Image (cartoon, coloured by chain):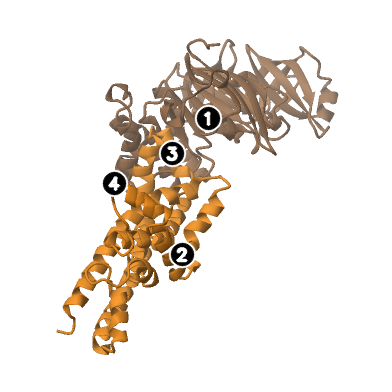
C-alpha cells in the first residue's frame, strides 16, 4: 500500500454532524498543488488532516514513500513528529517572542543534520532582515505572513502546507507577499499544498489543481487541464480562465512589447511588459471573458493578439445566454466566452478554424 | 514597641504559611486549571464546581470537614498516621493543607481563564514547529499565561494571609505553630488590647491594599506584548 517515491497519497474520511470529508488523492510529490474550493468545501479540513491537526476516522497518508498515517494499521504520527511546515491563514506567530525567536523556535527543534534551510537564506528569501528584533504586534499583516512562511521553512519541511496565507491580506499586501511565494516555488524543492478560494491565486501559483466541493474531490489534475474542466465552480463566472506556457522570443523596446511564442506552436503573443531575457519560460493567463471570436482575421482592429485557433468544444453557461468555447492553439487550449446569439450567428462548429481576438493578456510567474 | 514577641512570630508564621501554600497551589493548581481549560469531559463541570466550593462555603464548614478527615478517625488522618506522619490537626502542616484547599479557586480560576484565552492556535503552531505537547506547554503556554500566573500567585498568597475560620478550626491558636496574624488580632480584641489589635489590623489593611494595587497595575501593563 505504499506510494512510489515522488508522490503523495492522501485518503481521508472524516464525519461531523453537518459536514463530511471523503477524499482520495494522488498528488505529485513536487511543485505546488492548489486545493481549491468554496468555504465549507473541506479544503482546510483536508490540509489539517495532512498536518495531523485533525485525526480522520479513516486515513491513509504516504508522502514520498514515508507512511505518516494508516488507520488500518493503527499508525498516526502526531503533528510534532511530521516533517511539515504549516502556514496558517492568520500567521499565528508567538506573541511573546520576537521575530527572530519565532524563527528560531522551529529551527532549534530539528537536528542539526536535518537543517537544509539556513536562517540567513530564509530571512533573505522572505525579505525580513530588518524585522528580526521586532515583536509580532508591531508588524503589518503582510510582514507577519512573511515571517510565518520563513518560520515554517526553517524546519526544513518535506511538505509545506499553506492555508490561505493571503486571505487575511488586502490587495496591496497580497501583491507584496505573492512574489515571495513564487520565489519559494523556484528556489526550493519543497512540495507545497496550497489552499485557496481565489482562482487567480491558484492559477498564478499552482502546477496541479484539486477542486473540492462539499467535502468531495470534484477534479484533480495538472493545472492547465483542470482549468479547462467545465465542472469547475468558477467556470460560470468571470474567473473562467486558461493558462498557456510559452517562451520569450524578443523584446520590442520601442513599444515595450514582449513577444512570446506559445509552446509547440508557431503562434506568437504580444504583451506590454518590462523586458525579460530571451528564451525565458513564461506562463500566461487568458481570461475567457477577454477573448472573442471572428471567422476571418480582422485587419483593422486595435486588438493586438489575433490568433488562429481550432474549435475543440463548448458548454452552455448556467445563464443560458453565454457559451464557453474551448479552442486549441498548437498543443494548448484556451477558453473564449461569447454570447449564444453570436455563437449561432457565426455558426460555430467542431474543428472549425476561427480567429481568437485576445483583448487582455497577463503574465503569470516566470517558470 | 507596639508589637509583642507573639505578634512578630504570628507575622512570620503567616508569611511562611502563605508562601508555602502559594508554591504548593501553583504546582497543584496548574495541572487542574490546564485540565479544566482543555477537557471536553463531562467531569469538567463537577470538578470545576468542587474547586470553586471554597468561594461560597463558610470557612468553618471547610475547617470542620478537614478537622474530621485529618483527625485520628478520619480517612486522611489514618493515612498520615500509617505513613508515619502522625495526626496533622493542630500542626503547621495541617494548616498548610487546609490553606491549599481554602485558596484553591483563587489560583485555579485565573490560571484557567489565562489558559482558555490562549486558545488552540499557538498550540497548533508549536506542534507544526516540532514541539511536543510538554515542550509546547513550557515554551508557549507558560510565557503566554504569565499574567494569569502572577494574578494567581498574588490572589493565592493574599487570600491565605487573610484566612481565619479554617485556621481556627484545624489549627487552633498555638503561638509559634498555628497562631497567625488574623487569629492574633482576635486574641488581642478578646483581651481588650485594642492598641495591638490596631497595629496588626492596620498592617493587614495596608498589606491588602498594596497587594491589590500591585495586581491591578500589573494587569494594566500586561495587556499587550509591546
Same chain check for tags 1 and 2: no
In the image, which is nearer the foreground, mark 4 or mark 2?
2
Camera-nearest residue between A113 and A289: A113
Residue A351 falls in which quadrant of the image? top right
Q: Is residue A115 positioned above or below B14 on the image?
A: above
Which one of the lettered chains is coloured orange?
B
Q: Is residue A38 positioned above or below A6 on the image?
A: below
In the image, which is nearer the foreground, mark 4 or mark 3?
3
Tell me which numbered mark, 3 or 2, is placed earlier along the sequence.
2
Camera-nearest residue between B74 and A130: B74
In the figure, what tint was chain A given? brown
Same chain check for tags 4 and 2: no
Q: Going by the image, does A203 lie left or right of B34?
A: right
In the image, which is nearer the foreground, mark 3 or mark 2?
2
Disc 4 to disc 3, how far (Cα)?
20 Å
Same chain check for tags 3 and 2: yes
Image quarter where the C terminus of chain B lies is bottom left
Disc 3 to disc 1, how far (Cα)?
17 Å
Kind of element beneath mark 3: helix
Image quarter where the N terminus of chain B lies is bottom left
Say whether marks 3 and 1 touch (CB < 8 Å).
no
Say whether marks 1 and 2 touch (CB < 8 Å).
no
**Which residue occupies 30% across, 28% down?**
A118
Q: Residues within 10 Å of mark 1 (few under 14, many from 20)?
A: many
- What mark, if any, has residue B54 been given in the picture? 2
Tell me which numbered mark, 4 or 1, is placed earlier along the sequence.
4
In the image, which is nearer the foreground, mark 1 or mark 2?
2
Residue denoted by label 3: B125
Kind of element beneath mark 4: loop
Q: Residues within 10 Å of mark 2 (few under 14, many from 20)?
A: some
Disc 4 to disc 1, how far (Cα)?
29 Å
Disc 1 to disc 2, how far (Cα)?
52 Å
Amino acid at each position: 500500500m505504499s506510494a512510489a517515491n515522488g508522490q503523495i497519497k492522501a485518503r481521508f474520511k472524516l464525519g461531523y454532524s453537518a459536514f463530511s470529508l471523503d477524499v482520495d488523492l494522488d498528488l505529485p510529490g513536487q511543485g505546488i498543488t492548489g486545493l481549491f474550493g468554496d468555504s465549507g468545501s473541506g479544503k482546510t479540513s483536508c490540509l489539517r488532516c495532512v498536518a495531523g491537526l485533525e485525526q480522520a476516522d479513516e486515513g491513509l497518508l504516504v508522502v514520498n514513500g514515508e507512511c505518516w498515517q494508516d488507520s488500518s494499521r493503527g499508525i498516526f504520527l502526531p503533528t510534532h513528529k511530521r516533517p511539515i511546515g504549516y502556514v496558517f491563514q492568520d500567521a499565528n506567530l508567538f506573541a511573546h517572542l520576537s521575530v527572530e525567536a519565532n524563527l528560531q523556535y522551529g529551527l532549534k527543534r530539528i537536528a542539526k543534520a536535518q537543517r537544509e534551510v539556513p536562517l540567513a537564506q530564509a530571512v533573505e528569501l522572505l525579505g525580513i532582515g530588518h524585522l528580526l528584533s521586532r515583536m509580532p504586534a508591531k508588524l503589518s499583516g503582510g510582514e507577519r505572513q512573511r515571517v510565518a512562511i520563513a518560520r515554517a521553512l526553517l524546519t526544513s519541511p518535506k511538505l509545506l502546507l499553506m492555508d490561505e496565507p493571503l486571505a487575511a491580506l488586502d490587495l496591496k499586501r497580497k501583491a507584496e507577499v505573492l512574489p515571495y511565494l513564487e520565489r519559494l516555488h523556484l528556489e526550493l524543492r519543497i512540495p507545497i499544498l496550497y489552499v485557496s478560494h481565489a482562482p487567480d491565486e491558484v492559477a498564478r501559483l499552482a502546477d496541479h489543481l484539486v477542486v473540492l466541493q462539499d467535502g468531495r474531490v470534484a477534479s484533480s489534475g495538472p493545472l492547465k487541464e483542470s482549468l479547462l474542466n467545465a465542472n469547475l465552480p468558477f467556470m460560470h463566472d468571470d474567473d473562467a480562465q486558461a493558462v498557456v506556457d510559452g517562451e520569450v522570443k524578443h523584446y520590442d523596446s520601442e513599444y515595450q512589447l514582449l513577444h512570446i511564442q506559445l509552446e509547440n506552436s508557431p503562434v506568437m503573443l504580444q504583451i506590454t511588459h518590462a523586458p525579460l531575457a530571451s528564451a525565458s519560460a513564461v506562463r500566461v493567463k487568458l481570461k475567457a471573458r477577454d477573448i472573442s471570436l471572428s471567422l476571418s482575421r480582422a485587419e483593422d482592429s486595435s486588438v493586438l493578439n489575433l490568433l488562429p485557433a481550432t474549435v475543440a468544444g463548448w458548454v452552455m453557461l448556467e445563464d443560458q445566454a453565454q457559451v464557453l468555447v474551448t479552442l486549441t492553439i498548437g498543443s494548448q487550449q484556451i477558453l473564449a466566452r461569447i454570447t449564444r446569439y453570436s455563437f449561432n450567428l457565426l455558426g460555430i462548429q467542431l474543428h472549425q478554424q476561427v480567429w481568437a481576438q485576445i483583448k487582455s493578456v497577463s503574465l503569470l510567474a516566470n517558470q | 514597641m507596639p508589637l509583642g514577641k507573639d505578634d512578630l512570630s504570628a507575622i512570620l508564621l503567616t508569611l511562611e504559611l502563605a508562601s508555602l501554600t502559594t508554591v504548593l497551589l501553583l504546582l497543584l493548581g496548574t495541572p487542574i486549571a490546564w485540565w479544566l481549560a482543555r477537557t471536553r469531559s463531562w467531569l469538567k463541570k463537577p470538578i470545576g464546581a468542587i474547586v470553586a466550593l471554597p468561594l461560597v462555603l463558610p470557612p468553618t464548614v471547610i475547617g470542620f470537614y478537614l478537622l474530621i478527615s485529618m483527625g485520628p478517625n478520619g480517612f486522611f488522618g489514618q493515612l498520615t498516621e500509617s505513613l508515619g506522619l502522625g495526626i496533622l490537626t493542630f500542626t503547621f502542616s495541617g494548616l498548610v493543607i487546609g490553606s491549599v484547599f481554602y485558596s484553591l479557586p483563587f489560583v485555579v480560576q485565573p490560571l484557567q481563564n489565562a489558559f482558555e484565552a490562549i486558545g488552540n492556535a499557538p498550540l497548533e503552531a508549536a506542534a507544526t514547529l516540532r514541539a511536543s505537547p510538554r515542550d509546547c506547554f513550557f515554551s508557549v503556554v507558560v510565557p503566554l499565561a504569565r499574567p494569569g500566573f502572577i494574578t494567581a500567585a498574588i490572589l493565592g498568597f493574599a487570600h491565605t494571609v487573610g484566612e481565619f475560620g479554617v485556621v481556627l478550626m484545624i489549627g487552633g491558636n498555638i503561638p509559634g505553630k498555628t497562631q497567625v496574624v488574623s487569629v492574633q488580632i482576635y486574641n488581642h480584641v478578646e483581651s481588650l488590647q485594642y492598641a495591638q489589635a490596631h497595629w496588626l489590623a492596620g498592617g493587614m489593611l495596608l498589606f491588602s491594599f498594596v497587594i491589590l494595587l500591585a495586581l491591578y497595575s500589573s494587569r494594566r501593563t500586561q495587556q499587550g506584548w509591546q
